[in-house]
Image (tube, coloured by chain):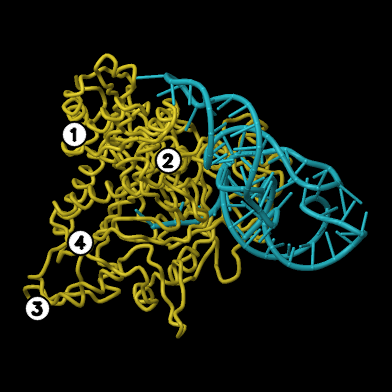
Amino acid sequence: MRWSNYLLSTLREAPGDAEVVSHKLLARAGMLMKVAAGIYSFTPMGFRSLKKMIEIVREEMDRTGALEVDLPIAQPKELWVESGRWDRYMNDGILFHLEDRKATEFALAPTAEEAVTDMVRRSVTSWRQLPFNLYQIRTKFRDEIRPRFGLLRGREFLMKDAYSFDVDQKGLDAHYVKMEKAYRAIFERCGLEYALVQADSGAIGGSASEEFMVVADTGEDALVFSEDGQYGANVEKAITAPLPEPWAGEEEKPFGRADSPTPGIVSTEGQARHLGTTEDRITNTMLYEAIRSDETSFVCAIVIRGDLTINEVKLPKALGVAHVRLVPEERLPEISGCKPGFIGPIGLMAPKGQDEVPVYVDRTMENARNVFCGANEDGTHHSNLSVKRDLKVAGVLEVATARDGDPSPTGTGVLRIKRGIEVGHIFKLGTKYSEAMKCEVADPQQKMIPLTMGCYGLGIGRTVAAAVEQNHDDDGIIWPVPLAPYTVALLSLQRDKEVLEAAEKLYTDLKAAGVEVFWDDRDERPGVKFKDADLIGFPVRVVIGGKALAKGVGEVSTRREKKAEGIAPEKVVEVVKATLAGGARALAV
RNA sequence: CGGGGCGUAGCGCAGUGGUAGCGCAGUUGCUUUGGGAGCAACAGGUCGGCGGUUCAAACCCGCCCGCCCCGACCA
C-alpha cells in the first residue's frame, strides 16, 4: 500500500484527554480516534492491527475445535431476567439497554451467556450431543461507571467470548485446560509478557477462574506473585501464609476497660504512636452491611489488625453474602455510639431487626492478645484485648489484603506485587446458567441433567492496547510483528527518478514475496518520514535515498534496534523476510 | 454517585467586559531535501448549548451537555 493512496494522518501532539501511553500513541499514529467516553473508531491503519489480533484468536480457537457462532448484540430482556442478571446489572448501572417501538426492552450484551445457553437448549436433548465449545468475536457493551485508559477500559469494545458445554465436571476441566493452552498460545504469538493468576469470578459467577494478565505498570489490577513463581493471584483473591504474630508467646494481661485515651486521634498510625505501640497492636473494627442475594441484609463487624486492610472482594464470599458495603458514616453512632476511629467489637448495639451485631475476626487476629481496640466511645480505647477470652466471635475469616513482602502461601519466600492488564479471563461456570435457564439433556440413565458450562473471555482491543503499553519507546510504537498493521515501511526519501524507480521496484518485489509493505511515497522531507515510520512502529524499515543509492544500496533496519545496514537491492527482500521471521528483534544479515 | 478540573480553528494551547489570537497541521508559490525545513501569501471559528446581566459577554451569573482526573464501583 502507498501512503499517497491511504487515509492516514499522524499527530505531533497527543489529544489532551489521552492519559495512557497506548491511547496517546495509537491516537498520534492516526490509528485510533475517540468518539465518546470509552468509545473509539479504528482508522484503516488501526483496524489492520485489530484484524491481526482477531485472526490470531480465531486460528487458535479453531485449532481447539471450538465452533464459531454469531450471537445477537441486542438481546431481549426476558433472557436476562431468566438468568437473573437483568436486575443485578441494572443495579450496577452498567447495562446499556433500550426499548423498541413497542416498549419491549433489550440489553446490549456485555457478555452472551444467556444467548448461547438459549441456543444450546434449543439444540440438544441428549448427552451424546456433547461436548462442544462455542465462541464468537463481537462487539460488547458495558456502560462502565468510569471508562478510562483508552482502549483498556471501553464501553464498547471487541471481545472474544467462548462458552463450553459438558455433561460433567470432568468434561469442563478438560475444556478449561484446553482454553488455558489456547490463551497461552495466543499471547505467546503476540509476543507479550503475560502471567496467569488466580482470580475472583465477579459478577459472572461460578467457581474456579483465572486471569491472563499482561504485565505493565499502567495496569489497573494489582497482582501478587510469590518470588519462586509458584503462586500468582489477583490481589482481589490473593492469600498469604499466616503472618508472624507480634503477641506470640505472651501471657494474657488483664483487660483494660476504656483505660487508654486517644483524644481526637482517628488514624491507626496516630493511635499507635500515641499509645506507644505498633500498628499491628491496634485493632480496627469495621462495620459492614452484608447484603444477601435475596436483598435482605444485616450489619456485622469485622475485626482486623491495624496494619492490614480488609479486601472487600474477598469479604462477601467469606461471609456467604452477595454484597457488602461499609455502613455509612452517619449511621455509625446508632450502632457503635461513637465516630469512626473508636469503634470496637465490644458493646455494639444491634440495629432494628437484628438481635446482635455478629463480630467476625480476620484470621490474623484469631489468637490476638494484649492489643488495643476502640471502646465505642469517642477518644477512648480498651487495652489488652484478648480475642479468645474477651470476644464472642461469630467466625474467623480470611479477608486481609495481601501486601508486598507478606509470606507466600507456597511456604517459601515472600510475595511481590506487580501491576497488570487483564486481557483474558477463564471461568468454570458450572451449572449456574444451565439450571436457571433449563439447559438440560438426558444422561445415559435418562435422567435430565443441567449442562456444565465454562466461559472464556479475551479482550481483542485491550490486548492490542496492552501490546503497545509493553512495546514502545519515546519515538512511538514498536509493534510485535504479528500485530503490526504492515510489517515493513518503505521510505523513498527523494522524488528524483532514480530513487522513485528503485523504490517502485523494491515495493513490487516485496509485495510479490508476500511481504506486507507500506510505502511512504509522499512528497515529504526525509525527517518527516522517519518520524512517522517510528511513530506508527512498523517492525522493519527499508529506506531508499540518494545517499545510500549512490553506493548502490538500500538500507534496512528494525524498529526495535534502529541500526540501519546498507543492503544490495537484490538482497533486500531476503534480508527483510529473514528479519521478520526472527520477530524483527534484530536485523538478519 | 461524591470531590476536583476542563470545554476557544483538525491537534496542542493563550486570551478576566470593548475588533478572537499563537504554535503545529492545511492551501498556493518560491527556496530546501538523510531525523518533524525557511520565506511569503492565504484559508479555516455557532469561543460546548440555552437563558440572564450589560450600551457591549469567549470573559460575569444560572441551568444543561460533554470530556478528563481522584475516589467509590466494576467483566
Task: Name the residue beneath numbered marker 4.
Answer: A68
Label 1 marks a residue whose chain is A
Upstream in sequence: badge 2 or badge 4: 4
Front in this rendered view, residue A139 or A340: A139
Task: Name the residue beneath numbered marker 2.
Answer: A222
**What amino acid is at disc 1?**
Asp
Residue B26, given in percent of the width and then of the height, sits at: 52, 41
Upstream in sequence: badge 1 or badge 3: 3
Give the residue drawn at x 55%, y 38%. Answer: A371
- Label 3 with label 2: CB-CB less than 8 Å: no
- Total marks in image: 4
Which of the labelled discs sits on residue A446, or is there none? 3
Within the image, what quadrant is residue A432 found in?
A: bottom left
Upstream in sequence: badge 3 or badge 4: 4
Task: Name the residue beneath numbered marker 1.
Answer: A509
Picture colour for chain B: cyan
